[in-house]
Image: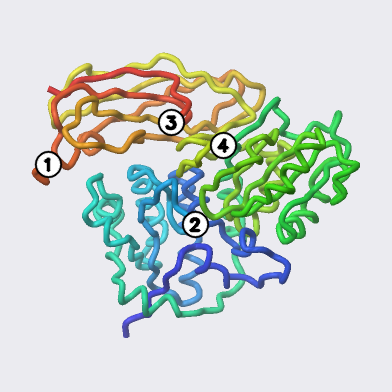
Amino acid sequence: MKHKLITLGFLSLLAGLAPVQAQESAPFRSPFPSALNVAHTWNRSLTKKAGLVVGKQLAAEGVREVALPDLTLVGPSSDTPLLNTYGESPYLTAETGVEMTKGLQTDGQLKAFIRIEEKEKKASYVRPWQRVLDEAHAAGIATPAQIAASDTDGKDLGPCSDEFRKTALQVAHESLTLLKNAGNILPLDTAWVKCVGVTGDDGLVADMMPVLQQGLPCAVSTDTRTADLIIVFEDDDIDSGRMGSLLLTGKPVVVVLLNSRPIALGKALDASAILEAWHPGREGMQAIADVLTGAYNPGGKLTVAFPDFAFGHGLSYADFRYTGLRIEPASIGPDGSVTVRFNVTNTGTRPGAEVVQVYLEDEESSVPLQCPKLEACKRTNVNPGQTKEVKFTIRQRNMVLLDHSGQWTVEPGFFTVRVGGGSDDIRLQGRFEVK
């Protein structure tokens, strides 16, 4: 007998995994963070673990097939929720999709049918869905008929395992992305912050208050008038009037975003600190509190650009220095590969995770290509004063393009390699030639 195909993304698919308290708003309702949160960790091993625990939980409830992951690429100007996708980079979507599918299909616990929009089959970039089929051996591509038939399926699932909850907390932690931190206002300094005022979206405030009152080492109140610092929780629709009034108080304002898509920040851009959390699930409340207090050092990076922040952007409570770029060999043939090496040093006082990123530009391509074009990345933990060598290999698949004749090819010429902590934070640059 053929099993029904369970579909929907993490947010809706997992919403039934555990009892939901009535006051929980959408960003905290699911027991597991959204797919977009998973991508913001830039952590391959954690992504595979996420797939494993989600698959194990579903398999225990009798589910045998899922329409996951969704490998549709998105643009930064999207006005629809992006929570079930991985972002705008073909490379990162492929890397995340491969590991997620491997996790979901561990030991045959599930069959994963990937989801893509029809336009992806004709895309001019290296197609993530093809890599997931080839490398992770996904069960296939979910057809429109399968998706339409299964989107209405409902299933009440049982309580989550400890392994599931621990993984959900780790994903929530690693996905939190610090967009701004003027004057190092975060983490909270109790030497002068004696009272924190909390405001914003009513549902989000109601969700967060118990966790903040228990976890912050200072008084926490919804009365912002007596506060030394104000934390405001906002969703997709930032209240510009409220934000303007808070900024006029002259007190430091920390904005925590729990949105489903990139948004124009408007007046919120003038806040002292901005933390992007997306929809981090039920464990996200604790993860946010941990970042605010400094119990956890944020290391997430944007996988989709904002009007005000570039792809790959994300800050840390630690500082990192990049040195010693080496690109070898200096020239290769069209079937060759190049090794990129460099050093990353934590020059701060806190341990931190840096997502190192390598962008590749074909200097004279015959067809327009994505820019910036991410082609390598790694999340690496670095202790204060420690230096780590990072090494990547640029292969043929990183250099190919679909030319005017419809052929995948590597064109001769020079390629520029840019290395840094984001597409807006390039620290090192070099080049090599394809002959």
Type of amino acid under label 4: Gly
Q: Mark 2 or mark 1: which is in front?
A: 1
Find numbered disc 1 in the image and state the secondary structure of the residue it sits on: loop
The part of the image, by quadrant, that contains residue 4 is bottom left
Image vertical order of residue 65 relative to residue 259, above or below = below
92 or 63: nearer the viewer: 92
Q: Mark 3 or mark 1: which is in front?
A: 1
Residue that badge 4 annotates: 299
Find numbered disc 3 in the image and state the secondary structure of the residue it sits on: loop
Q: Is residue 112 left or right of residue 407?
A: right
Specify whether residue 208 is in view.
yes
Residue that badge 3 annotates: 423
Q: Mark 4 or mark 3: which is in front?
A: 3
Residue 404: numbered disc:
1
Q: Quadrant of the N terminus?
A: bottom left
What's the CA distance linking mark 2 and mark 1?
Answer: 34 Å
What's the CA distance linking mark 4 and mark 3?
Answer: 15 Å
**Which one is earlier in the sequence, the residue at label 3 or at label 1?**
1
